[in-house]
Amino acid sequence: MSGVLDTVDRRTRLVGENRLELLIFKLNGRQTFALNVFKVQEVLKLQSLTDIPHSHYCVRGVTSIRDKTMPVIDLGQAIGMRPLDQVIGATMIVTEYNRSVQAFLVAEVVRIVNMNWSEIMAPPSFAGRNHYLTAITRCEEGLVEVIDVEKVLAEIAPPRTEITQELSEQALLPPLRERFVLLVDDSPVAITQAKNTLQKIGVGIEVARNGNEALRKLRHWSREEPERYRQLLLLLTDAEMPEMDGYRLTAEVRSDALMHDLYVIMHTSLSGSFNQSMARKVGCDALLSKFQPDELVDAVFEGARKVLSDPKNT
């Protein structure tokens, strides 16, 4: 896999084209799985491992790469499969999610594929292993299952959803109680986290599971239910979703005469300066890393101040 990730510059050109790159790999067995390349830093062989007493059963230990220590997680075991038999020398995918870096042990990395988000579908159900999937697709290797890493990490280290007292004191502001946020995310865990936090500030929440569903709702409200659209405070969207990603959704909003000035917050586990560039390119008003409850509330309050200060929105 030497040089497999030498594509960072090219990735930024996928923005607004509703495309993504998937890193295809195997765990235990013939089934293929995938992660978005945006979240992958590098692919390496595990050279050393230090045990962590009393750690989560899926955390096999910690390792150091260029003086940076990170947990090593058996990804197959985390989604209900049997653990890898051989750890030292196994392939690990180093990723960054929500400002944290971790390595996932896998059996084999296959290749990178470039796909359109329209080819990525929601899983048929959340029974069994599908409970850990956000999407499925097909390529030369057959059926590919896209893992919900946010759910995996939330089970290993549950995030907090509480907000500070100072922020909670602003929760009952009348203008917020009369408005709602359109929350767009394909991960049930991410939706629950965001809803639990936003409900604490008294703002209403409408949910869409992908960019296509969100765009249909927005177009319907702006054309058929203008009063409902007037109550919409802002759009809070994930970046990577089946059918239509958050970048394409934002670009569609900005190109629509009735919706072009909608306040948009990109709320994503993707990190790095290239993601900031992508968010600016499509016209996001703010970029926010998951999952930091105080920062989420701050971002919503900042958006609310800008929206409610505009005479046409009052």
Image: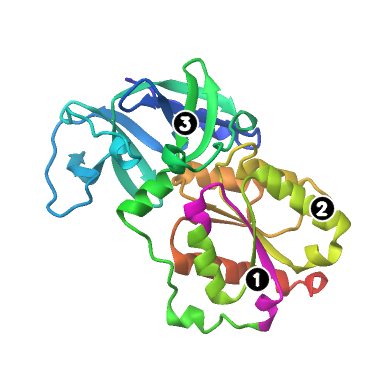
Q: Along the polypeptide, which appears first: circle 3 or circle 2?
A: 3
Q: Along the polypeptide, which appears first: circle 1 or circle 2?
A: 2
Give the residue type that dot 2 points to. Answer: His
Using a 10 Å C-alpha cutoff, classify the residue at mark 2 as few (fewer than 14 neighbours), some (14 to 19) or many (20 or more). Answer: some
Using a 10 Å C-alpha cutoff, classify the residue at mark 1 as few (fewer than 14 neighbours), some (14 to 19) or many (20 or more). Answer: some
- Report if residue 184 lies within the magenta region: yes
The tag on residue 220 is: 2
Nearer the observer: mark 3 or 2; the answer is 3
Write down the residue under mark 1: 304
Depth check: give the residue in front, 314 or 24.
24
Depth check: give the residue in front, 105 or 129.
129
- For label 1, the SS is helix
Please state the extent of the stretch shown in magenta in the rendering: 174-191
Q: Residue at x 52, y 84 (%)?
A: 169
Q: Quadrant of the C terminus?
A: bottom right
Residue 222 horizontal/vertical position (percent): 83, 57
